[in-house]
Amino acid sequence: MRELTYNEAALEAIAEEMRRDPKIFYMSTDALPPLLQEFGEQRVKATPITEAAFTGMAIGAAGCGFRPIADWRQVTFCFVAMDQIVNQAAKIHYMFGGQVPFPILFRASVGGGGLVAAQHSQSPYSMFMNVAGLKMFLPSTPYDMKGLLKTAIRDNNPVISFESSRLMGRKGPVPDEDYAIPFGQADVKREGSDVTVVALAWLVHEALAAAEELAKEGISVEIVDPRTLVPLDADTIRDSVQKTGRLVIADEAGPTAGFSAEIAAIVTEDAATFSRLKAPVKRVCALQVPIPYSPVLENHVFPDRNRIIAGIREVLG
Amino acid sequence: MALTSQSLSSQNLPTNLSPDKQREMLRQMLTIRRFEERASADYLAGKIYGVVHCYIGEEAVAVGVCSALGRTDRIISTHRGHGHCIAKGADLNRMMAELYGRQTGYCKGKGGSMHIADFGIGMLGANGIVAGGISIVTGAGLAAQMEGKGGVAVSFFGDGASNAGPFHECLNIAAAWKLPMLYVCENNMYAAQTAAAATHALSDVAKRAAGYGIPGIVVDGNDVFVVHQAAAAAVDRARSGGGPTLIECKTYRWRAHTERKGQPDPRDAREIEAWKGKDPIALLERQLRDQGELDDAGLQRMEREILGAIEAAVAFAEASPFPLPEQATDDVFSA
């Protein structure tokens, strides 16, 4: 099968959907050259640096029958549009009694590793998971990226595509034919029997490396990639934990009220899963600090395969 | 008429509006007033919940602007939104049912007074966040431009919102992209309890239009013909690709910020009385009488019909079921 990078897979999904549906248009503070070249300025709009305005405009255009894509680029840039995201996009369908759909795709890169410090490195998806009315996903492979973006663009709701900065250039197989990955379906990236690791994005790959390492010692690690954050596939996660009896959660965000806390909650509040746990749940997260600049500091803040291995050893006792 | 930064305020402007249209404008303004008088009374009686913001005193703005629009043109409103809904043609029954929190309301009881919308008539919703609607309706202006059918979009907002970021960001982008927009500032001189005089460096919001290279005009917001004429000219400009216009309507709200009992109202009682002397409805009545197009009998008939429609709306609301509790989880997402 041919290989595309994570970023190429995203652009291919968007271009294919824009060819299919003339109601889709793209707004971003810089027009993406391949999209601009193919679709022109009418459908690929370079906005002023005004995330608040163009996020709100996406909502209005969606309410009028268009299917806008608003690309915030880095997730930290969308914080100036929090009213439009939280008060408007998330609530407008519900608050108005479901009169019309608001199909909007928001794009935002997340994570660290770029040595660009706190205002350009963050993984704040749990802030948005906490808001009712937004769907969101965070893919770990080019295949998942393309398939989830297709579903997102065809969805009739505001959807946030969180995209890992560290994975942009990472290659993986992507089939030629059209496909879409439904929301709410986790993917078991590696089967195992001793411990479940639930990981997102870049940490899926770190967890896979950790599993390879531990396999040499006869430790069998199962890796579950939720892929979609809202809706979340609790069943696949619980099934895996019921099988292995042990859970490590790896997240590039900090632990406090985070994605990792949500995973721990859906596992431990379910009696059937809780009763199979052989050890306390372990979270392997970033430190709860703004992301620092210096490589020594940044490396210290983020979890990696070694910390995942340490976490697995801890739950194995 | 070429639009530049200027001030319009005359009670004797010639109007090309037919007598029927003028009477319809009066009917709408009276409907807004009587609807809100009833909403306020029912709120104080405990039949309407939460909060109600009344538009009384500002009726000429919504009616003057919306009378210059077509049904498919789109507007967005504020927390003080009943007037814009009625002026755009919303159904009184469904409005009152929403205030009463009933299943038959515009939002199935999910929104209340601050969130009435009717996308079928281009009313993209009242918005409870000051300046919250401006960017959304600018997106409707973008949609109208992309549709290419000559549609326009209107943002109603207050003097308070004109100090918030989205006002400036959206005026800039609308001007840069020549979006078919009207930005209608209802300057009632107070942002909740705070006087505009204390928070604005310039006395006229419209002067800010110069910073974006678009026309900014100040009008007497209590004279429905003046508002209509300014809006009609701005609509023509927008439909023909000329881009957005900022219209500042000087007006005044007669009532406190909300209907809640016991809230402070720092405004001078003499100021309130002086503005009541400039009642936009009384002015329009006089103008119609002067033209020989309205008499006592006609006015009384109109009043009876309006009060009858409002009674019917209340009866509809009271007869409507409340939502089922479990419907709280409906409509978080669209299918």
Image (tube, coloured by chain):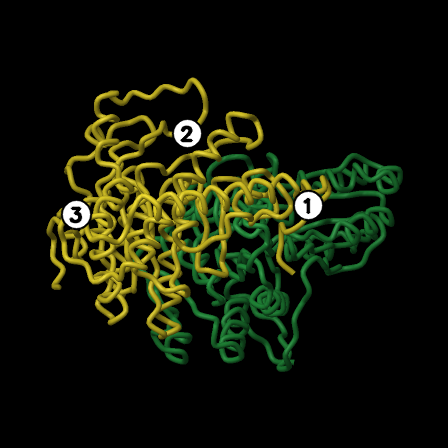
Chain colours: A green, B yellow
Residue drawn at (53%, 69%) of the image: A10
- Between discs 2 and 1, the one toward the N terminus: 2
Disc 1: CA contacts within 10 A as few (<14), some (14-19) or many (>=20): few
Chain letter for the residue marked with disc 2 in the picture:
B
Instruction: Please tell me which residue lies in front, B315 or A101.
Output: B315
Q: Which residue is mark 3?
A: B218
- Between discs 3 and 2, the one toward the N terminus: 3
Q: Is residue A239 visible?
A: yes
- Do discs 2 and 1 belong to a common subunit? yes
Which quarter shows the C terminus of chain B?
A: bottom right
Residue type pointed to by label 1: Thr
Q: Which residue is mark 2?
A: B258
Residue drawn at (82%, 55%) of the image: A192
How far from the left and from the top, in percent, is residue B301?
Answer: 40, 46
| Mark 3–mark 2 distance (CA, rounded to whole Å) | 26 Å
Which quarter shows the N terminus of chain B?
A: bottom left
Nearer the camera: disc 3 or disc 1? 3
Give the image quarter of residue B253.
Answer: top left
Residue type pointed to by label 3: Val
Circle number at residue B329 = 1
Chain letter for the residue marked with disc 1 in the picture:
B
SS state under label 1: helix
